[in-house]
Image (cartoon, helix red, strand yellow):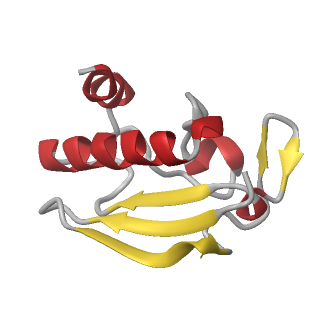
Amino acid sequence: MQVSSHALIKRTGEIVQFVPFNERAWHAGQSNYCGRERCNDFSIGIELEGTDSDEFEDIQYRKLAQLVSSLQAAFPQISDNITGHSDIAPGRKTDPGTGFDWDKLHSYLKG
């Protein structure tokens, strides 16, 4: 994937896109995903407003699932390649943290 973007999903469910899909975003920094470094070169960063330990709002999960589904339709190579900042930059990034329910997200994606 040769796109990079950066968006935020507020606690109200509002989606704010900071960087368009055809421009490079600097959301990941020094990072590695599946052995490939510099995730800014090939990834889409979606932030959720909140903290690492607070639970996220249901509307955020629903909007995230809708956004991911739309992105998967536009960029089929995304497939199930969805992960947190904490997985691509361990020790440096901690989000989405313990407050994020991956099972809930996957449930919405299937549903």
**Left or right: 54, with 94 as reference point:** left
Vertical relation: 45 (above or below) 27? above
Residue at x 33% of width, y 28% of height: 109
Task: Kindly identify the residue that appears in the image at 54 percent across and 59 percent down.
Answer: 45
Nearer-the-camera pick, 94 or 11: 11
Q: Is residue 55 visible?
A: no
Residue 79 screen position, x and y as percent: 57, 30
Quadrant housing residue 102: top left
Q: Nearer the viewer, residue 11 or 3?
A: 3
Locate the C terminus and report the quarter of the image it occupies. top left
Q: How many marks?
A: 0
Q: Is residue 10 above or below residue 23?
A: above
Residue 42, given in percent of the width and then of the height, sits at 73, 56
Residue at 31% x, 20% y is: 110
Asked whether, in this view, residue 111 is left or right of residue 99, the answer is left
Q: Position of residue 98 (x, y in %)?
A: 39, 38
Q: Taking 33 as reference, is 80 left or right?
A: left
Residue 62 in sight in this render: yes
Occupied quadrant, residue 82? top right
Give the residue at x 39% y 74%.
17
Between residue 22 and residue 94, name the one nearer to us: 22
x and y percent of residue 49 in the render?
Answer: 30, 63
- Above/below status of 76 relative to 94: above
